[in-house]
Image: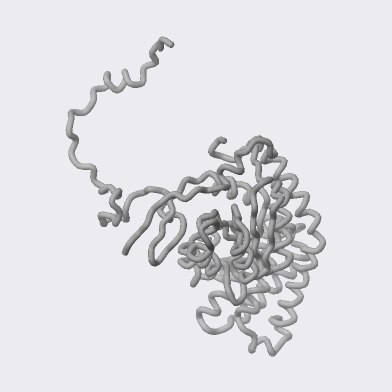
Amino acid sequence: MSDALLPSTRINLERATVLVLDDNGPSLDILSQVVSGFGVKQLLRAESVADAQTLVRTKTFDLIISDVQMPTTDGIEFIQWLRREGGETNRYIPVILVTGHTRTSQIFKVRDAGANFMVAKPITPKVLLERIFWVAREDRAFIECDTYVGPDRRFKHEGPPPGTDGRRKDDLPPEVGDAQTPNMSDDEIANLMRPAKVQI
Amino acid sequence: MKVRKFRPTNRLTALIKERGGIMAKDAIAAAEAGVESLRESSMAALDEAIAEIERRFGRDTPERVTEVYEGLYVLGSRIIDVSAFVSDAGIDKAAVSLCTLVDSCEHAGYWRWDAVDVHIDALRLLRAHGAELPLDQREAMLQGLYRVSNYRPEEA
Protein backbone atom coordinates (compact mmCIF):
# COMPACT_ATOMS: atom_id res chain seq x y z
CA MET A 1 0.00 0.00 0.00
CA SER A 2 1.20 3.51 -0.72
CA ASP A 3 1.52 6.15 2.00
CA ALA A 4 -1.37 8.28 0.81
CA LEU A 5 -4.90 7.05 0.25
CA LEU A 6 -5.39 7.24 -3.50
CA PRO A 7 -8.76 6.77 -5.24
CA SER A 8 -7.42 3.49 -6.64
CA THR A 9 -6.05 2.21 -3.32
CA ARG A 10 -7.75 -1.04 -2.35
CA ILE A 11 -8.99 -1.35 1.20
CA ASN A 12 -10.63 -4.32 2.83
CA LEU A 13 -12.63 -3.74 5.98
CA GLU A 14 -15.03 -6.67 5.52
CA ARG A 15 -13.62 -8.60 8.45
CA ALA A 16 -13.03 -5.60 10.71
CA THR A 17 -15.21 -5.27 13.79
CA VAL A 18 -15.96 -1.63 14.47
CA LEU A 19 -17.67 0.11 17.37
CA VAL A 20 -19.25 3.53 16.81
CA LEU A 21 -20.33 5.57 19.82
CA ASP A 22 -22.38 8.76 19.76
CA ASP A 23 -25.19 9.89 22.06
CA ASN A 24 -26.90 11.90 19.31
CA GLY A 25 -29.07 9.55 17.23
CA PRO A 26 -28.88 11.38 13.87
CA SER A 27 -25.12 11.73 14.24
CA LEU A 28 -24.75 8.04 15.09
CA ASP A 29 -26.83 7.19 12.01
CA ILE A 30 -24.51 9.23 9.77
CA LEU A 31 -21.40 7.69 11.29
CA SER A 32 -22.84 4.19 10.92
CA GLN A 33 -23.80 4.75 7.27
CA VAL A 34 -20.34 6.04 6.46
CA VAL A 35 -18.58 3.10 8.11
CA SER A 36 -20.96 0.58 6.51
CA GLY A 37 -20.27 2.16 3.13
CA PHE A 38 -16.59 1.39 3.63
CA GLY A 39 -17.49 -2.30 3.59
CA VAL A 40 -17.56 -3.00 7.33
CA LYS A 41 -19.89 -5.93 8.05
CA GLN A 42 -19.43 -6.14 11.81
CA LEU A 43 -20.59 -2.72 12.98
CA LEU A 44 -21.81 -2.26 16.52
CA ARG A 45 -23.48 0.93 17.71
CA ALA A 46 -23.64 2.43 21.17
CA GLU A 47 -25.52 5.54 22.28
CA SER A 48 -23.86 5.80 25.68
CA VAL A 49 -20.51 5.07 27.24
CA ALA A 50 -22.17 2.49 29.50
CA ASP A 51 -23.44 0.58 26.43
CA ALA A 52 -20.01 0.86 24.78
CA GLN A 53 -18.29 -0.50 27.88
CA THR A 54 -20.63 -3.49 27.90
CA LEU A 55 -19.76 -4.22 24.28
CA VAL A 56 -16.03 -3.82 24.87
CA ARG A 57 -16.22 -6.32 27.72
CA THR A 58 -17.86 -8.95 25.51
CA LYS A 59 -16.43 -8.48 22.00
CA THR A 60 -13.08 -7.94 20.34
CA PHE A 61 -12.91 -4.81 18.21
CA ASP A 62 -10.46 -3.65 15.56
CA LEU A 63 -11.42 0.03 15.57
CA ILE A 64 -13.47 2.39 17.74
CA ILE A 65 -14.91 5.68 16.53
CA SER A 66 -16.31 7.77 19.38
CA ASP A 67 -17.89 11.15 19.88
CA VAL A 68 -16.30 13.37 22.52
CA GLN A 69 -19.17 15.40 24.00
CA MET A 70 -21.62 13.12 25.78
CA PRO A 71 -23.64 13.52 28.96
CA THR A 72 -22.70 11.77 32.22
CA THR A 73 -19.54 10.10 30.87
CA ASP A 74 -17.86 11.58 27.81
CA GLY A 75 -15.68 10.13 25.07
CA ILE A 76 -12.49 11.21 26.82
CA GLU A 77 -13.32 9.24 29.95
CA PHE A 78 -14.37 6.28 27.82
CA ILE A 79 -11.01 6.15 26.03
CA GLN A 80 -9.14 6.52 29.31
CA TRP A 81 -11.16 3.59 30.69
CA LEU A 82 -10.58 1.56 27.52
CA ARG A 83 -6.81 2.05 27.67
CA ARG A 84 -6.60 0.88 31.28
CA GLU A 85 -9.52 -1.47 31.80
CA GLY A 86 -10.68 -2.45 28.31
CA GLY A 87 -9.17 -5.94 28.47
CA GLU A 88 -6.04 -7.17 26.71
CA THR A 89 -7.75 -7.67 23.32
CA ASN A 90 -9.19 -4.16 23.15
CA ARG A 91 -6.87 -1.91 25.18
CA TYR A 92 -4.52 -1.07 22.33
CA ILE A 93 -6.85 -0.85 19.35
CA PRO A 94 -6.96 2.30 17.23
CA VAL A 95 -9.43 4.94 18.40
CA ILE A 96 -10.66 7.89 16.36
CA LEU A 97 -12.42 10.65 18.28
CA VAL A 98 -14.94 12.82 16.45
CA THR A 99 -16.15 16.18 17.67
CA GLY A 100 -17.85 19.26 16.33
CA HIS A 101 -16.25 21.58 18.85
CA THR A 102 -13.69 21.27 21.60
CA ARG A 103 -14.18 23.30 24.77
CA THR A 104 -11.16 25.32 25.85
CA SER A 105 -11.07 23.39 29.11
CA GLN A 106 -10.92 20.08 27.24
CA ILE A 107 -8.11 20.70 24.77
CA PHE A 108 -5.43 19.08 26.94
CA LYS A 109 -7.81 16.36 28.11
CA VAL A 110 -8.51 15.38 24.52
CA ARG A 111 -4.79 15.34 23.75
CA ASP A 112 -4.15 13.11 26.76
CA ALA A 113 -7.16 10.82 26.34
CA GLY A 114 -5.18 8.17 24.48
CA ALA A 115 -6.89 8.38 21.09
CA ASN A 116 -4.99 7.86 17.84
CA PHE A 117 -6.64 10.61 15.88
CA MET A 118 -9.19 13.39 16.11
CA VAL A 119 -11.64 14.16 13.30
CA ALA A 120 -13.79 17.28 13.11
CA LYS A 121 -17.51 17.03 12.56
CA PRO A 122 -19.45 17.28 10.35
CA ILE A 123 -18.07 13.95 9.18
CA THR A 124 -17.33 13.48 5.49
CA PRO A 125 -16.65 9.99 4.10
CA LYS A 126 -13.41 11.04 2.41
CA VAL A 127 -11.83 12.50 5.54
CA LEU A 128 -12.92 9.61 7.75
CA LEU A 129 -11.59 6.98 5.34
CA GLU A 130 -8.27 8.83 5.11
CA ARG A 131 -7.99 8.78 8.90
CA ILE A 132 -8.94 5.09 9.16
CA PHE A 133 -6.31 4.34 6.54
CA TRP A 134 -3.81 6.39 8.52
CA VAL A 135 -4.45 4.65 11.85
CA ALA A 136 -4.33 1.26 10.10
CA ARG A 137 -0.88 2.04 8.75
CA GLU A 138 0.72 3.95 11.58
CA ASP A 139 3.56 2.34 13.42
CA ARG A 140 3.45 4.49 16.52
CA ALA A 141 4.76 3.15 19.78
CA PHE A 142 2.40 2.86 22.72
CA ILE A 143 3.19 4.59 25.99
CA GLU A 144 1.97 3.25 29.29
CA CYS A 145 2.68 5.08 32.54
CA ASP A 146 0.86 6.37 35.61
CA THR A 147 -0.50 9.44 33.88
CA TYR A 148 -1.06 8.28 30.30
CA VAL A 149 -1.86 5.19 28.26
CA GLY A 150 -2.08 5.54 24.51
CA PRO A 151 -0.15 6.13 21.30
CA ASP A 152 3.04 8.14 21.66
CA ARG A 153 2.00 11.79 21.39
CA ARG A 154 5.48 12.80 20.22
CA PHE A 155 5.33 10.99 16.91
CA LYS A 156 6.81 13.75 14.79
CA HIS A 157 10.30 13.21 16.28
CA GLU A 158 11.18 16.88 16.34
CA GLY A 159 13.44 16.40 19.34
CA PRO A 160 13.08 17.65 22.90
CA PRO A 161 11.70 21.14 23.58
CA PRO A 162 14.26 23.96 23.01
CA GLY A 163 16.52 24.55 25.97
CA THR A 164 16.02 21.08 27.45
CA ASP A 165 17.97 17.84 27.16
CA GLY A 166 14.83 15.76 26.85
CA ARG A 167 13.61 13.02 29.15
CA ARG A 168 14.11 9.97 27.00
CA LYS A 169 17.16 7.82 26.46
CA ASP A 170 16.94 8.28 22.68
CA ASP A 171 16.57 12.08 22.79
CA LEU A 172 19.39 13.75 20.89
CA PRO A 173 20.81 17.16 21.87
CA PRO A 174 20.03 20.02 19.46
CA GLU A 175 23.77 20.64 18.90
CA VAL A 176 25.52 17.82 17.08
CA GLY A 177 29.03 18.98 18.02
CA ASP A 178 32.14 19.59 15.92
CA ALA A 179 32.83 17.61 12.77
CA GLN A 180 35.14 14.65 13.38
CA THR A 181 36.45 14.43 9.79
CA PRO A 182 37.20 17.06 7.10
CA ASN A 183 34.33 18.28 4.94
CA MET A 184 33.85 16.43 1.65
CA SER A 185 35.10 18.16 -1.49
CA ASP A 186 32.74 19.24 -4.29
CA ASP A 187 34.08 16.40 -6.44
CA GLU A 188 33.41 13.82 -3.77
CA ILE A 189 29.84 15.07 -3.39
CA ALA A 190 29.36 15.13 -7.18
CA ASN A 191 30.62 11.54 -7.40
CA LEU A 192 27.95 10.46 -4.95
CA MET A 193 25.28 11.83 -7.30
CA ARG A 194 26.81 10.65 -10.61
CA PRO A 195 24.87 7.93 -12.45
CA ALA A 196 26.93 4.81 -12.97
CA LYS A 197 26.43 1.63 -14.93
CA VAL A 198 25.57 -1.36 -12.82
CA GLN A 199 26.33 -4.97 -13.71
CA ILE A 200 23.46 -7.30 -12.83
CA MET B 1 7.89 7.28 37.10
CA LYS B 2 8.00 3.97 35.27
CA VAL B 3 7.26 4.32 31.55
CA ARG B 4 6.62 1.31 29.32
CA LYS B 5 7.12 1.86 25.59
CA PHE B 6 6.09 -0.90 23.20
CA ARG B 7 4.43 -1.65 19.87
CA PRO B 8 1.20 -3.61 20.24
CA THR B 9 -0.18 -5.54 17.28
CA ASN B 10 -2.57 -3.47 15.21
CA ARG B 11 -5.08 -5.98 13.80
CA LEU B 12 -6.51 -3.32 11.49
CA THR B 13 -3.16 -3.12 9.68
CA ALA B 14 -3.45 -6.72 8.52
CA LEU B 15 -7.18 -6.65 7.85
CA ILE B 16 -7.18 -3.59 5.62
CA LYS B 17 -4.51 -5.14 3.39
CA GLU B 18 -6.29 -8.48 2.86
CA ARG B 19 -6.99 -9.56 -0.70
CA GLY B 20 -10.27 -8.43 -2.22
CA GLY B 21 -11.90 -5.36 -0.79
CA ILE B 22 -12.87 -2.29 -2.74
CA MET B 23 -11.16 0.76 -4.15
CA ALA B 24 -11.14 3.85 -1.93
CA LYS B 25 -13.15 5.85 -4.47
CA ASP B 26 -15.87 3.18 -4.46
CA ALA B 27 -15.88 3.02 -0.65
CA ILE B 28 -16.30 6.79 -0.47
CA ALA B 29 -19.06 6.74 -3.12
CA ALA B 30 -20.92 3.98 -1.25
CA ALA B 31 -20.59 5.89 2.02
CA GLU B 32 -21.84 9.10 0.40
CA ALA B 33 -24.82 7.27 -1.07
CA GLY B 34 -25.61 5.81 2.35
CA VAL B 35 -25.38 9.20 4.01
CA GLU B 36 -27.56 10.75 1.33
CA SER B 37 -30.39 8.47 2.44
CA LEU B 38 -30.29 10.33 5.76
CA ARG B 39 -30.67 13.80 4.28
CA GLU B 40 -34.33 14.22 5.14
CA SER B 41 -34.08 13.02 8.74
CA SER B 42 -30.89 15.01 9.26
CA MET B 43 -32.48 18.21 7.99
CA ALA B 44 -35.43 17.57 10.30
CA ALA B 45 -33.01 17.18 13.22
CA LEU B 46 -31.22 20.39 12.23
CA ASP B 47 -34.46 22.37 11.98
CA GLU B 48 -35.58 20.94 15.29
CA ALA B 49 -32.36 22.06 16.96
CA ILE B 50 -32.64 25.61 15.55
CA ALA B 51 -36.30 25.79 16.63
CA GLU B 52 -35.42 24.62 20.13
CA ILE B 53 -32.62 27.18 20.35
CA GLU B 54 -35.07 29.95 19.42
CA ARG B 55 -37.71 28.63 21.82
CA ARG B 56 -35.41 28.33 24.83
CA PHE B 57 -32.73 30.93 24.14
CA GLY B 58 -34.38 33.48 21.81
CA ARG B 59 -34.81 37.14 22.74
CA ASP B 60 -38.57 36.60 23.22
CA THR B 61 -37.96 34.12 26.02
CA PRO B 62 -37.36 35.99 29.29
CA GLU B 63 -36.82 32.69 31.12
CA ARG B 64 -33.67 32.10 29.10
CA VAL B 65 -31.68 33.73 31.89
CA THR B 66 -32.33 30.61 33.98
CA GLU B 67 -31.00 28.22 31.33
CA VAL B 68 -27.68 26.43 31.79
CA TYR B 69 -24.82 26.89 29.33
CA GLU B 70 -24.76 23.17 28.57
CA GLY B 71 -28.25 23.36 27.07
CA LEU B 72 -27.29 25.76 24.29
CA TYR B 73 -23.91 24.10 23.78
CA VAL B 74 -25.53 20.71 23.17
CA LEU B 75 -28.03 22.20 20.70
CA GLY B 76 -25.21 23.94 18.82
CA SER B 77 -23.31 20.63 18.70
CA ARG B 78 -26.37 18.84 17.31
CA ILE B 79 -26.48 21.32 14.45
CA ILE B 80 -22.81 20.66 13.65
CA ASP B 81 -23.41 16.88 13.75
CA VAL B 82 -25.81 16.93 10.80
CA SER B 83 -24.65 20.04 8.96
CA ALA B 84 -22.61 18.30 6.25
CA PHE B 85 -25.72 18.45 4.08
CA VAL B 86 -25.80 22.25 4.29
CA SER B 87 -22.10 23.08 4.47
CA ASP B 88 -22.58 25.24 1.36
CA ALA B 89 -24.82 27.46 3.50
CA GLY B 90 -22.23 28.02 6.23
CA ILE B 91 -24.49 26.68 8.99
CA ASP B 92 -21.78 24.35 10.31
CA LYS B 93 -19.41 27.29 10.76
CA ALA B 94 -22.05 29.45 12.43
CA ALA B 95 -22.82 26.60 14.84
CA VAL B 96 -19.13 26.15 15.69
CA SER B 97 -18.98 29.89 16.40
CA LEU B 98 -22.05 29.56 18.63
CA CYS B 99 -20.42 26.71 20.61
CA THR B 100 -17.28 28.83 21.02
CA LEU B 101 -19.42 31.70 22.30
CA VAL B 102 -21.27 29.52 24.82
CA ASP B 103 -17.98 27.99 25.99
CA SER B 104 -16.56 31.48 26.59
CA CYS B 105 -19.74 32.57 28.38
CA GLU B 106 -19.52 29.56 30.66
CA HIS B 107 -15.86 30.31 31.30
CA ALA B 108 -16.67 33.95 32.13
CA GLY B 109 -19.69 33.01 34.22
CA TYR B 110 -22.26 35.20 32.46
CA TRP B 111 -24.33 35.19 29.26
CA ARG B 112 -23.65 37.65 26.43
CA TRP B 113 -27.20 37.77 25.13
CA ASP B 114 -26.53 40.23 22.30
CA ALA B 115 -23.97 37.83 20.91
CA VAL B 116 -26.33 34.87 21.34
CA ASP B 117 -29.09 36.80 19.50
CA VAL B 118 -26.76 37.58 16.60
CA HIS B 119 -25.90 33.90 16.24
CA ILE B 120 -29.55 32.80 16.37
CA ASP B 121 -30.44 35.37 13.70
CA ALA B 122 -27.53 34.19 11.57
CA LEU B 123 -28.48 30.52 11.91
CA ARG B 124 -32.04 31.30 10.84
CA LEU B 125 -30.87 33.39 7.88
CA LEU B 126 -28.24 30.88 6.74
CA ARG B 127 -30.73 28.02 6.96
CA ALA B 128 -33.20 29.93 4.78
CA HIS B 129 -30.88 31.61 2.29
CA GLY B 130 -27.27 30.67 3.10
CA ALA B 131 -26.60 28.66 -0.03
CA GLU B 132 -27.98 31.43 -2.26
CA LEU B 133 -25.94 34.23 -0.70
CA PRO B 134 -22.93 35.43 -2.69
CA LEU B 135 -19.79 33.88 -1.24
CA ASP B 136 -18.33 37.20 -0.08
CA GLN B 137 -21.54 38.13 1.76
CA ARG B 138 -21.76 34.75 3.49
CA GLU B 139 -18.09 34.91 4.43
CA ALA B 140 -18.52 38.47 5.77
CA MET B 141 -21.41 37.25 7.92
CA LEU B 142 -19.36 34.39 9.32
CA GLN B 143 -16.39 36.67 9.98
CA GLY B 144 -18.76 38.93 11.90
CA LEU B 145 -19.89 35.98 14.02
CA TYR B 146 -16.27 34.97 14.65
CA ARG B 147 -15.48 38.47 15.91
CA VAL B 148 -18.42 38.32 18.31
CA SER B 149 -17.55 34.85 19.63
CA ASN B 150 -13.75 35.26 19.45
CA TYR B 151 -13.58 32.07 17.38
CA ARG B 152 -10.34 31.76 15.46
CA PRO B 153 -10.73 29.17 12.69
CA GLU B 154 -6.99 29.15 11.99
CA GLU B 155 -6.37 27.86 15.54
CA ALA B 156 -9.17 25.30 15.58
Residue A183 x %, y %: 21, 28
Q: Nearer the viewer, residue A174 or A76?
A: A76
Residue A80 x %, y %: 50, 66
Q: Quadrant of the N terminus of chain B?
A: bottom left
Q: Quadrant of residue B44?
A: bottom right
Residue drawn at x 75%, y 65% is B127
Q: Nearer the viewer, residue A132 or B28?
A: A132
Is residue B143 something one can see in this rendering?
no
> Is A184 rendered above or below residue B137?
above
Please indicate whether residue B53 sits to the left or right of residue A137 in the image. right
Please indicate whether residue A64 sits to the left or right of residue A192 in the image. right
Q: Quadrant of residue A98?
A: bottom right
Q: Quadrant of residue A118?
A: bottom right
Is residue B35 something one can see in this rendering?
yes
Please indicate whether residue B23 sits to the left or right of residue A139 in the image. right
Residue A108 x %, y %: 46, 66
> Is B117 rendered above or below residue A46?
below
> Is B34 rendered above or below residue A109?
above
Residue drawn at x 72%, y 58% is A30
Residue drawn at x 46%, y 58% is A150
